[in-house]
Image (cartoon, grey):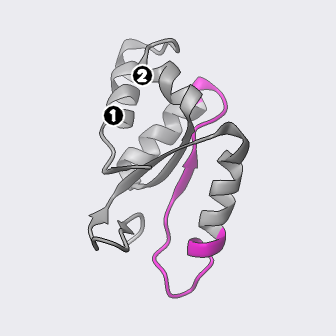
Amino acid sequence: ERGCIVCPVSSQIFQRALLIVPVNVLSNWATEINKWVNSKEDMIKISVYKLEGSKEERISAIRNWREGGGVLLITLDTFCRIINKDTTFSERNEIEVREGLLTPNLVV
């Protein structure tokens, strides 16, 4: 099954993980996850989404992550701007985006 993450300490299974990272390592995290997890034949593949680009691209990334699971990479600045409503979305999208960011299974 694609998109499930197993914690090596507790063996708990997570569908959606939110990784809040510094802007200068956002792409590095995506590269490392793909290198160490998704390139291995015997491991379950994990979808990786980076929250960057236009509003439409960010909304699409959050929507895909919520529906399909995996890892969503976001910078602290972007996370704070969205949660504090400094970034505006349509009313429907704002609810979906904020709810998505506030209800992951795991935050790192």
* Residue furthest to the bottom: 42
Instruction: Tell me the quarter of the image containing the N terminus.
Output: bottom left
Please, what is the three-letter code of the amino acid marked with disc 2? Ile
Q: Are marks 1 and 2 in contact (CB under 8 Å)?
A: yes
Q: Quadrant of residue 38?
A: bottom right
Q: CA distance from mark 1 to mark 2?
A: 8 Å
**What is the magenta range?**
35-56
Percent x, y of residue 24: 73, 42
Q: Which residue is mark 2?
A: 83
Q: Residues within 10 Å of mark 2 (few under 14, many from 20)?
A: some
The residue shown at (58%, 24%) is: 55
Q: Position of residue 26 (x, y in %)?
A: 66, 46
Q: Label 1 amino acid? A: Leu
Disc on the earlier residue, 1 or 2: 2
Q: Which residue is mark 1?
A: 102
Location of residue 92 with respect to 50 vertically, above or below: above
Q: Which residue is painted at 69% across and 47% down in the image?
A: 25
Secondary structure of the residue carrying numbered label 2: helix
Q: Tell me the residue at 40%/29% (across/down).
A: 97
Q: Is residue 50 left or right of residue 27?
A: left
Residue 28 is inside the magenta segment: no
Quadrant of residue 21 in the image?
A: top right
Q: Is residue 32 left or right of residue 104?
A: right
Residue 107 percent coordinates (x, y)? 39, 47
